[in-house]
Image (cartoon, coloured by chain):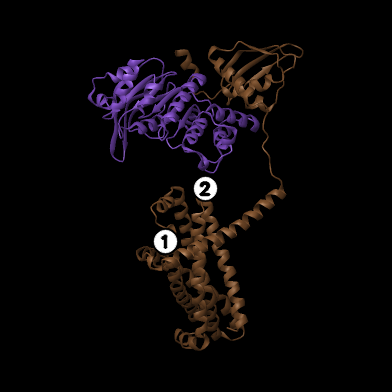
Amino acid sequence: MTQVLADRDFDEARTPAAVRQTPGADTAICLGDWTAMGLGRLARARPRLDPATRHVDLSAVERFDSTGALFLSQLLAAAPEAEISGEQQEWGGLLVLVREERAAVGGRRRHRREGPLARLGRQSLGLLYAAVDFTAFIGEMAVDMLQQPGRLRLGQVALELRRAGVNALPIAGLLAFLVGVVMAYQGGTTLQDYGANVFLVDLIGITMLREMAPLVVAIIVAGRTGSAYAAELGTMRITEEVDALRAMGVSPYEMLVTPKLVALVVAMPLLSVWAAATGVAGGLVVAATYYGISPVTFLSRFPDAVDASHFWLGVGKAPVFAALIAAIGCYQGLRVRGGASAVGHATTVSVVQAIFAVIVADAAFSIAFQAVGL
Amino acid sequence: MADGAVIEARKVTTRLGGQVIHDGLDLAVRDRELLAVAGSSGSGKTVLLRALTLLQPIAKGEIRLLGQPTAGLRRAEARGLRRRMGVMFQRGALFTGMSVLENVMFPLREHARLPNRLARDVAMLKIRLVGLGADAAMLRPNELSGGMTKRAALARALALDPDLLFLDEPTSGLDPVGSADFDDLIRRLQGLLNLTVVVVTHDVDSLWAIADRVAFLGDGRVLALGTMDELASSEEPTVRRYFGGQRMQRRQLDGQEQ
């Protein structure tokens, strides 16, 4: 017994496996560790037994495991008449086992790799299916909402409003403020060359109210809230909580999706107003400090320079962005299948797709507004 | 301590969140035996398994694996030791992003420098050994049934032909037929691969079917240690209550009839 134990230390110094066979000789001698750990070098060298081999001597083998047995049986395929000798008693089972397994399975099944064309086709189809799938999701959500409009869960909505709206105020305000600062700097230098410092008010006001505030808010919300929706719903799918809701006759849309969507549609225009205000404040600070426009001048010029329509257009875009972000986040979350990595993937995809969708929608808005002359 | 012990716990004390789970626990597992760890829920069976597999730090005492103390192991030593232990977790803990085959190949790839083809063949051998087909090898963990998940997890634990195999509730969640099949599988593999096995289970049928010896945990220590027959006739009140249930009596009646 003690010998067995001495053999079982966790000594790293192992003897690599080897096969020795003098050319023409009918005996092959195996040495060393015929184990998963010891076989690496030998297996990479792809040794071949002489087809005329009649004896394989295992008496110099120090350790032997199922990897060794498998490799030995693969070697023996080249020398069908070879007989094994010198094996230790406890290895017998392994040898028999490996022979049986090989006999049962027969030839090796090759794993087919798909070509580039097949991959392109698969991905194109995948995109198409995803589009159909997303449309179906929107439809299901709409039907669910419209069939029972009274069953809006106000408690959930309030919770989501706080998480997506109130808690986002500091970060949205700070970022919009900084964007205002940057724009005032960049625009101010150019306008100063023409002595048109005062037009800084127009520049800041219009871009901030109409474009930057909703866009900055949308990007923050997509990264902060859309991803959280995807991760939350994705995890709930994996832990079968979504199925549990269904099994209890509670619609997951009503419980999970609709409150988020409603809350975000309410929260984003408000965040957008807040971001516009802090952005203008950022511009105001820079204008007053570096370009000689006092806060009083700035604010008194503001109503003349910036038409109210800019404000309404900007705020009006926010609910659309909100709906896109919430729908994409929830959709990606609910279609999670598999495990932990699928949740991570869904989260990433939701952010990328949401920001993409928001910018495409913004471009569409610009073209549409231009066409109707707003 | 006992000769031929490949796993030894000496005066082991473990704490979890301020609560003492084991208090001076002694246990020795003999070479190539199948030791089952039984005990009521919350008696620290799984914590003991985690301590023996070096996943749970112990507060006091010593754990020796394969004759070596495990306190203060260096990284390379710990890695070498872990290579010689296979652990099957209760819920499988298969990597969700990989197919069954990739799961089983994972330890081979991490530790052994085998050519890819051989590693694949070895993994397939293990997958067939646990009774899964070539089709199952290509499935993802979420596409497996409960029984298949257990088998795949066992195949992964066996990937490197470990000397020590630790199984946490291998038959939980399986139907009686599936449990019996799994017990047979464990027994067969133990003989085939010369394994020393530690099984945590509260499946009494399993205890009768596979255990060479049973360690019964309670009050933070091993209350009783012996063959199933010895335990079933134990005088220890907790052990008596545990094995005195209806299912046990039926089992013994069956035995007498045969």
Q: Is residue A222 visible?
A: no
In the picture, one chain is purple; tell me its letter. Answer: B
Amino acid type at circle 1 is Glu
Amino acid type at circle 2 is Ser
- The residue at the point 42 percent across, 61 percent down is A254
Q: Classify residue A98 by image quadrant.
A: top right
Q: Position of residue A353 (x, y in %)?
A: 56, 61
Mark 1 — residue?
A: A254
Mark 2 — residue?
A: A341
Q: Compared to A337, does A2 lie above or below?
A: above
Nearer to us in this view, A84 or B78: A84
Mark in front: 2 vs 1 = 1
Label 2 Cα neighbours within 10 Å, binned few <14 / some 14-19 / many ≥20: some
In the picture, one chain is brown; tell me its letter. Answer: A
- The residue at the point 43 percent across, 24 percent down is B197
Q: Position of residue A179 (x, y in %)?
A: 52, 72
Relative side of A69 to B29, left or right: right
Q: Quick one: label 2 or label 1, which is nearer the N terminus?
A: 1
Q: Compared to A31, does A117 lie above or below?
A: below
Q: Is residue B228 visible?
A: yes
Q: Classify residue A73 by image quadrant.
A: top right
